[in-house]
Image (cartoon, coloured by chain):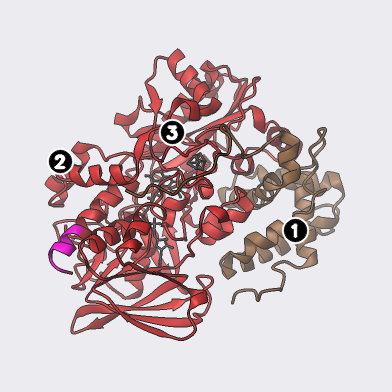
Amino acid sequence: MAIPDGDPCFSRSEHAILRAFGAEALPGGAPGAPGAHEIDLAPTYERLFRAADPLALWGMRAYLRTIEFLPVLLARERVPFSRLPARARRRFVAAWDDSPLMPVRLAFMVLKATVGMAYTSHPAYAAAIGYSSDCLHEERPLGPVPVR
Amino acid sequence: MIIDLDDVHSDLTETADVCIIGSGAGGAAVARELTAAGASVIMLEEGAYYRRADFNRRLDHMIPLLYRDLGLTTALGFPSIPVPLGKTVGGTTTINSGTCFRAPRPLLDGWERDLGVAGVGGGALDPYYEKVEERLHVQPVKEDLLGKNAELVRRGARALGLHSEPLRRAVTDNCRGCGVCCFGCPSDAKMSVNLSYIPAALERGLRLFTRCLALRLLVENGRVAGVEAGFVRRTQDRPERFLRVRARTVVLAAGAIYSPLFLLSHRLGRARGQVGRNLSLHPCSRVTALFDETVEGWKGVPQGFCVDTLRDEGVMLEGIQGPPALLGPLLPFSGRRYQELVEAAPRLAAFGVMIKDSTRGRVRRLPGRRPLVTYFMNRDDFGRVLRGIGLLVKIFFAAGARKVFPPLHSLPEVSSPEEFERRLDPDQSPADLEGMAFHPLGTCRMGGDPSRSVVDPEGECRDLPGLYVADGSVLPSALGVNPQMTIMAVAARIGERLARRGA
Ligand SMILES: Cc1cc2nc3c(=O)[nH]c(=O)nc-3n(C[C@H](O)[C@H](O)[C@H](O)COP(=O)(O)OP(=O)(O)OC[C@H]3O[C@@H](n4cnc5c(N)ncnc54)[C@H](O)[C@@H]3O)c2cc1C
Ligand code: SF4
């Protein structure tokens, strides 16, 4: 079933996992460009996943929960992903990104692409790199479409 | 007349000569032929009708509106390949790059000679192509719209003595090179069928139902008798209202993933087992390069230029830049190095590789109107992709790139063409590739042999009289070039012949 209008797609703790991943994938640092955790990407995730197949949303939520609890089993620190110390989280993400197993890498890419898209669509990033879609030629008034 | 979900307050029953399912390249071409001949036509489109004012150039706003499942439809295999599809009036043409090619003449001759697709060989499709080209305003991209990305590729190709040229596109003189063609053209310049064919058909009486999902065929006395549809906000939602269309002819044009799915859900074609098979994808990938100079690759037509030196080997290099939000998510690395690259976006150039594939995948049906698409790229095809990547690496370095990022997990960054040659493992598995695909074709293939085809050369389904298929799914093999024009030419031919027979 689709998410009823008004209800969020992700819970607060799921947004926290996305933010923690964002802090690792896109930590910011250079002058002007904020890190993914420093801008509010939650509305973008909500907008994207509201349009998704409910099964895809369900899959994403289950996937986020798995990420959250994997370090409890696998990392030395035995705490959830969103509470891992920065260095340990970095190690965890790097191992995941570098996995020789294609399905593991694919799972990583799905999350990285989601966070990367939300981040690179954000006006704060556009401002930092000087992107504008106003392009090569001046805006000009547009006439009717010439249908042949 | 356009009737949207929000206009409907009770269940409806309508009658027409022909009911078309899907408003993309194929469906629009059929609708235009039939309405021009005076037929009464109803078109059902699952997506909504968006206009210029809706296209705000932000990917994170446009993808949920215009793409099916956020563009994440995926062909599972090694590698798994995303196959984005449009779900809106105009279908995938509304979100495509607008590049126009005719299929190579020898290929069409082969379809007629070897596969029994009568009426496409020997130049028979030319008049249809001409009509499509005229209506879509097809013309080469103007020099002042190519942008720096294309300029760099031209510089590199020239240094290596390779042939390169501007592509031909479906576009009016309103194009301003804003680079967001795949997210709805905000200038009404790209002549996707929502702007060209559908308005012309509406003027001639087309009744277009939007956010209206075709659910099942009505069958009477062994012949198609219409379609039952439901008005939905999202594909998986329960319909809010129903529409019953009575029509003696139904044209299925839901695209190469959803047309076979629709047939499979009716258990059509099961005896011959051909429905959903024979999927070709034209797998693609992208090579990115870092320059010292400013590129601002988002300025200009994203797919305005090509290098066609390897075309006879089934490898095309075509532009693929666009806004940074298209480039960013697919750059290599994570953490600090990823951040650096993302911030270097103004100095990044990118270009695409597309191959004519010999691999064949399959569309199967999962519960809940979901397709299961599988595609295991063979080594020949992977070799071809690698040739294209290798050539692009050379082109970028010849143009002065500082670093090049091939789309290979085992080789994400190189500093020279020699390093690429040296480090490339020829035995690497295709799973190493980060691929994409934009041209699914062939899953309801047309042909003369009933045991090897889903529809006959007129487009009529072999298992249900009165049901026609007219979209990318009927093209029997990969083209090696962008397919929209060929889909439209073949669909126009199907529509014209239906009209002649008084459909
Ligand atoms: C990003 C991108 C760029 C591309 N660039 C180019 C290019 O430059 N040049 C080129 O030649 N090709 C390009 N293509 C491919 C080209 O656009 C497609 O091959 C072509 O549009 C396919 O036409 P079609 O009629 O088969 O299906 P589509 O155009 O996909 O239309 C199918 C329609 O059917 C609707 N539908 C499906 N099921 C139902 C149902 N049950 N009920 C009601 N409606 C339904 C869908 O919502 C959709 O609108 C590109 C594709 C993509 C994704
Ligand atoms: S580049 Fe041209 S065709 Fe593409 S979106 Fe901009 S104006 Fe439209």
What amino acid is labelled 3 in the image?
A: Glu
Whichever of labels 3 and 2 marks the residue nearer the N terminus, that label is 2
The part of the chain drawn in magenta is B496-502
Residue B501 drawn in magenta:
yes
Residue that appears at 48% across and 80% down:
B8
Q: Is residue A33 above or below residue A76?
A: above
Residue B163 drawn in magenta:
no
Q: Is residue B362 visible?
A: no
Which numbered mark, 2 or 1, is in the foreground of this view? 2
Q: Mark 1 packing: few (<14 Cα in 10 Å), some, or many (20+)? A: some
What amino acid is labelled 2 in the image?
A: Gly
Q: Taken as a whole, is the magenta stretch helix, strand or loop? A: helix
Q: Chain A drawn in what color?
A: brown
Q: Which residue is mark 2?
A: B123
How far is mark 3 from mark 2, CA to CA?
26 Å
Q: Which residue is mark 3?
A: B318
Instruction: Answer whether labels 3 and 2 touch (C-beta < 8 Å).
Output: no
Residue that appears at 49% across and 65% down:
B48
Q: Secondary structure at mark 1?
A: helix
Q: Quadrant of residue B403?
A: top right
Q: Chain B drawn in what color?
A: red
Q: Secondary structure at mark 2?
A: loop
Q: Secondary structure at mark 3?
A: strand
